[in-house]
Every structure is written in C-alpha cells, then in structure tokens.
Image: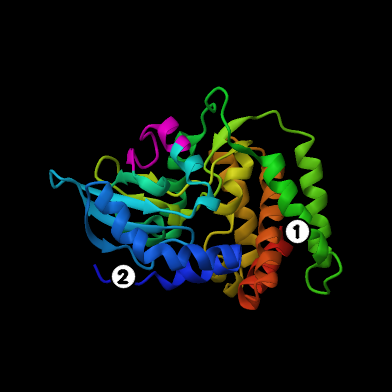
Amino acid sequence: MGFEAPRRLVTALHERYGEAAADWLGRLPGLAERVPAEAGLTVERVVAPGGRGSLVLLVRDAAGTPAALKIAPPYSRPEQERDALAHWNGWGAVQLLGEGPEGALVLERLHPEVSLRSLPEAKALLEAAGTVRKLWVDPPAGHGFDTVAGRTARQAEAMERHRADADAGELTAAALAAREELLGGSAEELLLHGDFRQGKVLGGDRAPWLAVGPDPVVGERAYDLARLVRERVEDLVASSAGAPAARRRVNKLADSLDVDRERLRGWTLFRTVESGTRALAGGRRQEAEWLLEFASWL
C-alpha cells in the first residue's frame, strides 16, 4: 500500500506533541503496513482528511466484513478511548470490535464522509443532542478516566501566561474565574465524550448517527456540551446576528437536555477561551480571533 499521512494529522500532532510526534509519524508508514497485517485485516484505503489525532484505515477482515482500523500514538492514550467504547458497547457510539497491535482499535465501519456537519444547523443540533444524551452514563467502577477538574487544571495552567495578552487577557481571566466557580458547584460524575461536536458524529448502518473519537472524561454534562455550542464558529462570526444566535444556542441546548443555562455558558466560555489561547500559541491567528470573539459574546 502506497502511504502518505494525511496533512491534517501531521500538522495537528506536530503542534501538540512536537518531537514526540515527529518520531511517531516517522514510524507511521511502517505501522500502516504492519498493524493491519498482524491483525488479519486487508486495507482498502486511508480515510482523508481524517482526524487530528490518529490514522484511520478502512479495512476488511478475513471474512470480507468491513471495519475501520484506528492507529493512534501511545501518548494520546488510545486505551482510554477503548475503555469508553467498551463501556458504551455501541449505545450512541461506534462499536468496538477488537484490538490490534500497538494499541490499534478495530471499529465498526461507519460512513466517514457523512457527519452531522452535512446537515442544516437546526437539524444537526437536534441530532447531536439526541446522540450525546445516550453517552452520559455512570462510569465503570474503578475506572481510570480523567476528570473534568484534572483536565481543566492542566489547561488552566497553560492559559495563565495569556493573562497579560492585549487581545486575550481579559477573557482569559474571566474564563479562569468561571472554571473555579463551576468546579465548586457540581456533583455530577458521568462518563462524557470529552470532545463532542458535529464532526464527531458519523452516519451509520446500525443506527443513523453514532459518536466517534471520544477523549473520555468524567464530570458534568454541561462540560460535554460546551464544544458543541461553538459549532460552525466561523459562520457565526461572519453573521451580523452572531452574538444573539450564540446566546440562543446556549439556551436551546441547555433546555433540550435539562442542563443549567449558566453552567453551560460558563463551561462554553472556559473551553472556547482555552481553545482560542491554544490557537494563539500555535500561530493560528485567524482561528484564535474567531474563538475569542465568540467567547466575548457569552
């Protein structure tokens, strides 16, 4: 199989993991040949543009049954995704079919070219809400998943250096304050997708829509909805009615899923500013401007 890693994957991993990414990406052509062969799978093609954290191959097993093979670097903790998918067991999420070498996951074949982003916004949000509510279950006993408090503590530490930024300082301070207040007021300890958005919900055959690519975390539901609130942010920023539309989206999603509006607003502020400051640090100025403007509306 002639192999070239998708450009989006290369860029994202280099930005996030630096030299460690370069080492793994250098090994990736060999992994793309060896892992499916050792798992008894025949490769059809690479999914492109694919994701930002892993390589996904469309494959078939010895009986000709279609599947997908996901190969991720070890420092992205693919075992966390494995454990979450196993716990959901196909309820609202892609079915875990098995494991391969190097922590690879063999998954139910979905339609990678069809996500909720292909739907009109109102319909996409409705389907997203129906999907994510299925994932909010009690975590397994003795789980090793990250917590919202722990994950956001690491993010908050990285955000601190942006307090003095001319563009992001005020919003950074507000986001950090919101996090502190939110962590003092929630007793929910549910298993969350952790990176839920329209692009993470794909069309399937077993069910119309199924979530993929979790970055599982345990905490409150409002945290899991926050990334969804800013969906299609570039369109909102370009609209003259972007600010009221964003606030309506917060209220609509909160009400439809019985989540407190203010808690959803607070986590949306934190997660949007965290993404915006990370984009600044990565040199993605346009993306950062969109995100920070969106955050200022909240």
Residue that badge 2 annotates: 3
Say if the magenta span includes residue 94.
yes
x then y, percent, for residue 247: 65, 55
What is the tally of numbered marks visible in this picture?
2
Which residue type does callout 1 highlight? Ala
Can residue 122 be seen here?
Answer: no
**Residue shown at 71%/55% (left/top)?**
269
In the rendered image, the quadrant that contains the N terminus is bottom left
Q: Using the image, determine if residue 284 lies above or below residue 161.
A: below
Q: Give SS at disc 2.
A: loop
Q: Which residues are magenta?
A: 83-99
- State left or right for residue 75 relative to residue 49: right
Viewer-side residue, 222 vs 9: 9
Viewer-side residue, 195 vs 117: 195
Name the outermost residue toward the left: 63
x then y, percent, for residue 249: 58, 53
Q: Specify the color scheme.
A: rainbow
Q: Using the image, determine if residue 156 lies above or below residue 48.
A: above
Residue that badge 1 annotates: 158
Of badges 2 and 1, nearer the viewer stands 2
Say if the magenta span includes residue 54.
no
Name the outermost residue toward the right: 164
Which residue type does callout 2 highlight? Phe
Cα separation between marks 2 and 1: 35 Å
Q: Using the image, determine if residue 147 lies above or below residue 37.
A: above
**Residue shown at 61%/68% (left/top)?**
241
Q: Residues within 10 Å of mark 2 (few under 14, many from 20)?
A: few
**Residue shown at 71%/53% (left/top)?**
155
- Do the CB atoms of the residues marked 2 and 1 lie less than 8 Å apart? no
**Residue shown at 79%/48% (left/top)?**
178
- State left or right for residue 35 relative to residue 257: left
